[in-house]
Amino acid sequence: MSTILHLSDCHLVQHGDRLLGVDTQASLEAVLTQAVGEKKPDAVIASGDLAHDPSTDVYRRFVDTVRAATDAPLMCLPGNHDRLPVMQSARMPLAPLTLGGWDILWLDSHVDDQPQSRIDENDRSAIEGQFRQAAGAHCLIATHHPPVAVQCPWLDKDRIQNPEELLDWLREGSKLNGVERLRAVVFGHTHQVIDDVCSRIPVFGAPSTCFQFTPASAAFSIDESAPGYRWLTLAENGVVGSEERRVDTFPIHVQLK
């Protein structure tokens, strides 16, 4: 069995700055300290919005912060606040991962500087290429935007469109010797915990490592829930386990003005 630490929506800013009154660097460090104190991850997935100020030095600081906590393989992907060319120039670890019989792939749902998801033919071609390279019996896909509605209209308008068709296509594309290998999809963006199913595939949304959005909110709203993360377990039989964790010792006091 393999264990993955799933981080998302870290929103790092320039050194010494805060975002909405929150020290997002400190909250990320608190998350990592608690997480690696619980167990040693076999890999880390960082599913987007890693930076709120998408600059080379911020991205390098993100990687340095993770590396200071764990030497586990790291796979980063972009969110709507990120800029992929800058991530590439900062030499972020963007390559898919292999853990035993599992391949950890990523699907780009982001558009630089725009909140809504978009998965175009280039993105589909890229994940097809990853499938062709994947030799394991099981696949896990990470993306940034949710493939399901989360009952927050202001967030749901930007989610992945036609998700059932997309998941059906991904299930078909994952086949090796006629056998489907897609076992789950994980994502970020929602700043809250989501456990759902789409096209018979479990989908898991991670909390933010900084502030959280209020569940079932009709308009933009932040609550005072603690920073969080997910543990994912990948079993040899293809079953994905998931556990949400919170850093209750790190209080969140958002300043909207």
Image (cartoon, helix red, strand yellow):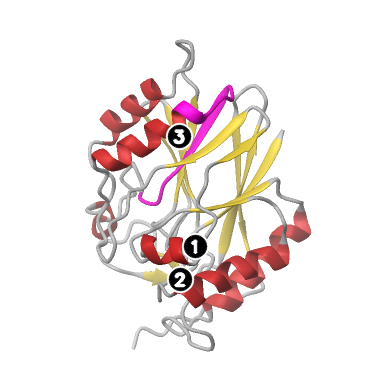
Where is residue 52? Give x, y as percent: 41, 73
Q: Which mark is residue 130?
A: 3
Residue identified by numbered label 1: 208
Tell me the distance, in whole angstroms, between the alpha carbons under discs 1 and 2.
9 Å
On screen, residue 21 above or below 5? below
Identify the secondary structure beneath mark 1.
loop
The amino acid pointed to by label 3 is Gln
Residue at horizontal 40%, vertical 76%? 53
Closer mark to the observer between disc 3 and disc 1: 3
Residue identified by numbered label 2: 11
Where is residue 249? Give x, y as percent: 67, 73
- Residues at badges 1 and 2 in contact (C-beta under 8 Å)? yes
On screen, residue 132 above or below 69? above
Left or right: 256 in relation to 162: right
Q: Which contiguous range is marked in magenta?
A: 132-145
Identify the secondary structure beneath mark 2.
loop
Left or right: 248 in relation to 188: right
